Structure formats: C-alpha cells, structure tokens
Amino acid sequence: MARIVSLVIASVAFASAACGDGTAPAAPAPAPAAATLAVPATRTAPAPPAAPLIAIRAGHFIDVISGHELAHQIILLRGSTIESVGAEDKIPDGVQVIDLSDMTVLPGLVDCHTHLADLANAEPLDVLRKTAAQAAFEAIPNARVTLLAGFTTVRDVGVYRAFNDVAMRDAIAEGIIIGPRMYVAGAYITISQGAGAMTGLAPDIKLPWDLEYGVANSPWEVREKIRELAHRGADHIKVLSTGAVLTHGSNPKSIEFTPEELRAAVEEAANFGLRVAAHAHAAEGIKNAIRAGVASVEHATLIDDEGIALAKAHGTYLDMDIYDEECIQSRADTPADFLKHDQDLGELQRRNFTKAVRAGVKMTFGTDAGVCPHGINARQFAYMVKYGMTPIQAIQAATVNAADLIGHPELFGSITPGKSADIVAVKGDPLADIRVLEHVSFVMKEGVVYKNEP
Ligand SMILES: [Zn+2]
C-alpha cells in the first residue's frame, strides 16, 4: 500500500511540473486515498475509518442537481468520500481547510466520448508504425492532461489496439499513472472494413490480432465478441452502426450493423450488465440503434425528426461531439479523404443538436477527444451553449447526465454526501461565461488534489 502512495504522489508532482502548474499540489491526506486507488475503478470503496476530515470552503457552488448556484458552502470530505455539503460556519475545529472562497466549485467533469488509450494522430494507420507498448506509453499524457483539465471521469469508447484502454484504466486505478476514472469499451465492435476497423491497407496485409479484435459480421459473432469483452474487463460495449468520417474508405451515410445485429448487441451486453454506445451518423443507422435499445448514440450527426422523437421516447442519450469540426478542418494532418467525408456534416450536426436540445432529448457531454487534442475537452461547452443549451444544461450534460448514462450516479456526477470527492473549481462564474471551464484552477479526484492554482 505504501508503495502505491509514493507512486501517486510522485506522479502528481511530475504532472504538475510537466504542465507548468507551479508548486506541488497540496494533496490532503494521501494515505486514505491510496485505499481507493488500489481498487478497481468500477467499484466504490468505503472511506477508511481513520481518514481525517477535510473542509473545502466554496465561495460559489454549483448544485448540478437543482441547477442553482449557491454562495458560501462548506464541503466536508473524509478520505475519498464527500461527507456533507452545507452553508458556512460549520467547519469543526482542527480540520484542514482548502480555501476556494474566491472560486466557483462544481463536480468533477465527465467526458462521455474519449479515446485516451490511442495515439492522438489524425491518421489511424500511424498505429501500424508503433508497437502496442509504444502506443500505450505515448497515450499516458492523454490521461494526465484530461484529468488536469478538470475531467475526473471519462467514458472511453473504443481503441484500435484492443484492451490498451483496459490496461490504462487499471494503471490509473492502481496509481501507476495519473488520469481520470475510466470506463472502457475494450475494442470497437464493427463490421469487416467498417467504421471501427483498421482500413486503408492492401488486401494481402494481415493485421495483428489486437487491431482486428472487434470485427463481427452476424448477430452471433457480435454476441461472441461481447462475451469475450465482458470477460476481459469491458465496462460497456461500443458498436458502429454506420460509416464514419475518420475511417478510410468509409461513408458516414452508409448503414453498417443491421437492426438484428444491433439488437443482439444490446441483449448480449445486458446479459453481462453492460450498456451499449452506438456510433451513428446516418439517420437510419441512428434510428436502428435507438430501436435496438442502445444507451447512447454517439455523434447523431444526421438525426431526423423521427430519430429525435424516438430518442425521447426511449430515453436514449445523444452524445454529440459538436466542437470537433474545428479540429478536423484545421489540423494539418487530417487526411484528405476524411475532409471529404466531413463535408457539411459539422454544420448539420450542430443544427440537429439545437433541434434535439429544443425537443428535450437527454444529452451528455462527449467530445471524441483524440480528434481534437486531449485536454481541451472543455472548449465544447461554449459550442453547446452557442447551439442551444443554457450554461447549466451544458454543465449537467457533463456531470449528472454523464453519471446516469455511465450507470454510476451513486459514485460521481454531483457533490453530494456519499459520493466520491471529485471536485473542480474555476475562477469566475461558468453560468455567466461558460468559457471559464476551459481554465480549471483546482482538480480533486477521489479526495486527492492534482491541481491547485489559486
Ligand atoms: Zn469516437
């Protein structure tokens, strides 16, 4: 246990130095936190009885459940767990105080669509130039910068090298590297040469097993993959319902998995207690996925009125990455065929986002991080507001709604007694200017401070 503590603290100090965060973070009571870090990320750890009480003095506090901003709140936490939240003057004697009285405090943010365990290159075939170990090491900073940007949890939705994401999740949970709490897919489940496949190679090239792990071409092959993924540690299942923008030889308007295959995915995942996230751009592919019972549709680019009504009726979350367009179009390394796929889609997706918000569809915050550089996830908030959400709706998409979609509302998503002490703070008022979330000053995950820039 002691070894884990020292690794965590060393990693925190390194992260701060590497990112120019200034002084070493004021990590409160590292010992109790180690107990949490040593267990799998998907479980809730009870607070160790010996952990001292810590108080956070919040000048402003965003209650994401009521949607209201409160002044002068005190958050008491013990170890990795929040004990109480309430009005000031309730700090017991002798308790360590973290003073955020000139900041706005809110729950740790959640990005429901990341690819932390992959290379961040725009060209997917670059993965063939690296060993699996190289890809794994090169992905470590992706996790670090995401956490330091205020994202204490991510739902990672696919990786080219199967199970690199499982390994990263576990390395973070064990304190070997720092990063957000991760929920992972293990691989992409995709048709042959589909949106989640490694495409663009000559037909006589044989891929290694991990780069074609999730290929499935019938309901029973889909079930077979899900059975394996469930056994090997996936937290959810990612299926590709339509073609993609960022895949060679793909057409985002094409239908890939059939309704029968999608239903098999949802049913088999449910057998293992797992939910399904479906990538879909084309309107029919979106509706196929919703009718099959997926928990979320990713991108939802060309969703039509019927699709919006279906999402509302089924309670399906839409996880729309409406900032990405800026990066796809501006990155120097975006392959030319991807730019062609992307034509008009960005603008259409943003318009459909506005329609879905107005219709009252459940929405989460998901950026497809990796398309844009990791760590700038929060830039999407301003776009969500520009295209129809109120600032509190955008924050709820990245907190309470995200926790609900991931299936752990008891663990994170709000600053509530009993939940994990995942807390961030910003200077300024995000309800007045959502862009202040792009510069998070304070990051705590599971009671450990990773960033504190007063
Ligand atoms: Zn993605």
Image: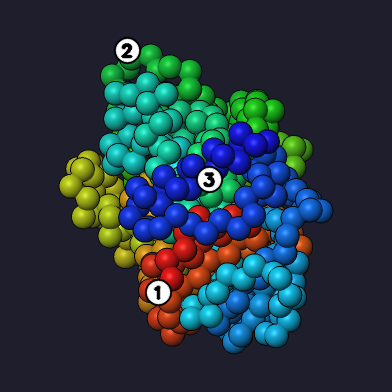
Query: Amino acid type of disc 1?
Result: Val
Closest to the camera, between mark 1 and mark 3, is 3
The residue at the point 48 percent across, 18 percent down is 209
- Label 1 to label 3: alpha-carbon separation: 28 Å
Position above or below: 377 against 271: below
Give the image location of residue 52, x and y in percent. 73, 60
Disc 1 target residue:
436
- Label 1 to label 2: alpha-carbon separation: 51 Å
Q: Count the marks: how many?
A: 3
Q: Looking at the picture, tell me which residue is in the foreground, 95 or 76.
A: 95
Crowding at dot 1, Cα within 10 Å, few <14 / some 14-19 / many 20+, comes out as many
Q: Is residue 387 left or right of residue 52?
A: left
Sequence-first disc among 3 and 2: 3
Crowding at dot 3, Cα within 10 Å, few <14 / some 14-19 / many 20+, comes out as many
Query: Amino acid type of disc 3?
Result: Ile
Asked where in the image residue 378 lies, by quadrant, the reply is bottom left
Disc 3 target residue:
9
The residue at the point 58 percent across, 65 percent down is 423
Give the image location of residue 439, x and y in percent. 39, 67
Closest to the camera, between mark 3 and mark 2, is 3
- Residue 325 shows in the view: yes
SS for callout 3: helix
Asked where in the image residue 183 lies, by quadrant, the reply is top right
SS for callout 1: helix
Do tag 1 and tag 3 residues touch (Cβ < 8 Å)?
A: no
The residue at the point 29 percent across, 30 percent down is 126
Give the image location of residue 167, x and y in percent. 55, 31
- Label 3 to label 2: alpha-carbon separation: 48 Å
Do tag 3 and tag 2 residues touch (Cβ < 8 Å)?
A: no
Sequence-first disc among 1 and 2: 2
Disc 2 target residue:
204
The residue at the point 66 percent across, 70 percent down is 55
